[in-house]
């Protein structure tokens, strides 16, 4: 059941995205190369929502899509090339634009926990609360209670501690510092799950 904020934020993002040529181009490429439900996730979604809500800089050219099924053979427009991201999924690149095309059944946090490939398992396993947010393309609605709460409260906190710690290790940063940097980049307040950062970590 959609909350008032979900409806409000969904409408805000849908109106904004409709006017963004780069997003529309990226979405068409994803539609041509996948089947089933498509969800937008990642920084393009949450950073542009934060921009619309609180006046921070917009996020323009890096798109992350979660899909039910990716085509075995990808068809790309002229000028686009296929590369690979750190999770061995396709990263489609053209000039300063990139599209990460992620099948739901390849999501690390789902497979690590031995869960079925369902959207709720993606949302429950994101490292931070702001990551726990997707936009359903067909239904034009935003899903993810933890992410919606993060947007509403302007706070960054851990969503899944073990996976957040693994994420911090991958980024080669202490978890508290990673939370602080994410919060600072959005103008949010960090909420630490661990003791305060020591002088050695700063």
Image: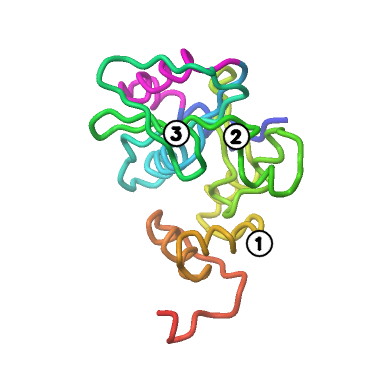
Mark 3, Cα crowd under 10 Å, few <14 / some 14-19 / many 20+, is many
Query: Picture coordinates of residue 75 (x, y %)?
Result: 41, 14
Say which quadrant the N terminus sits in: top right
Q: Name the residue under label 2.
A: 6
Mark 2, Cα crowd under 10 Å, few <14 / some 14-19 / many 20+, is some
Return the residue found at the far right: 115
At x 76% / y 44%, what residue is drawn?
114
Instruction: Indicate which disc, 2 or 1, sits on the residue closer to the N terminus.
Output: 2
Which numbered tag is attached to residue 13?
A: none
Residue 65 in magenta? no
Which numbered tag is attached to residue 100?
A: 3
Which of the two discs, 2 and 3, sits closer to the camera?
A: 3
At x 57% / y 17%, what residue is drawn?
138
Return the residue found at the far bottom: 199
Mark 1, Cα crowd under 10 Å, few <14 / some 14-19 / many 20+, is some
- Mark 3: secondary structure: strand
Relative to residue 177, is residue 27 depicted above or below? above
Q: What stretch is highlighted in magenta?
A: 14-35
Main secondary structure type of the part rendered in magenta = helix
CA distance for labels 2 and 3: 25 Å
Q: From the viewer's perspective, tell me whether residue 50 is left or right of residue 134.
A: left
Residue 18 in magenta? yes
Depth check, front residue: 65 or 83: 83
- Mark 1: secondary structure: helix
Are the residues flagged by discs 2 and 3 in contact, CB closer than 8 Å?
Answer: no
Query: Picture coordinates of residue 117 (x, y %)?
Result: 71, 33
Which numbered tag is attached to residue 161?
A: 1
Quadrant of residue 74 in the image? top left
Query: Picture coordinates of residue 80 (x, y %)?
Result: 30, 23
């Amino acid at each position: 059941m959609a909350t008032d904020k979900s409806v409000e934020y969904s409408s805000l993002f849908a109106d904004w995205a409709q006017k963004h040529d780069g997003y529309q181009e990226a979405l068409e490429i994803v539609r041509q190369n996948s089947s089933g439900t498509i969800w937008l996730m990642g920084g393009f979604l949450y950073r542009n929502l934060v921009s619309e809500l609180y006046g921070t800089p917009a996020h323009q050219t890096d798109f992350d899509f979660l899909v039910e099924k990716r085509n075995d053979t990808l068809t790309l427009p002229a000028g686009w090339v296929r590369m690979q991201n750190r999770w061995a999924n396709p990263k489609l690149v053209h000039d300063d634009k990139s599209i990460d095309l992620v099948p739901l059944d390849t999501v690390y946090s789902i497979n690590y926990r031995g869960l079925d490939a369902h959207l709720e398992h993606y949302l429950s396993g994101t490292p931070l609360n702001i990551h726990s947010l997707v936009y359903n393309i067909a239904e034009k609605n935003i899903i993810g209670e933890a992410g919606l709460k993060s947007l509403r409260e302007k706070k960054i906190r851990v969503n899944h501690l073990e996976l957040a710690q693994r994420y911090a290790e991958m980024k080669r940063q202490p978890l508290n510092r990673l939370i602080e940097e994410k919060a600072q980049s959005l103008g949010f307040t960090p909420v630490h799950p661990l003791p305060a950062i020591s002088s050695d970590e700063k």
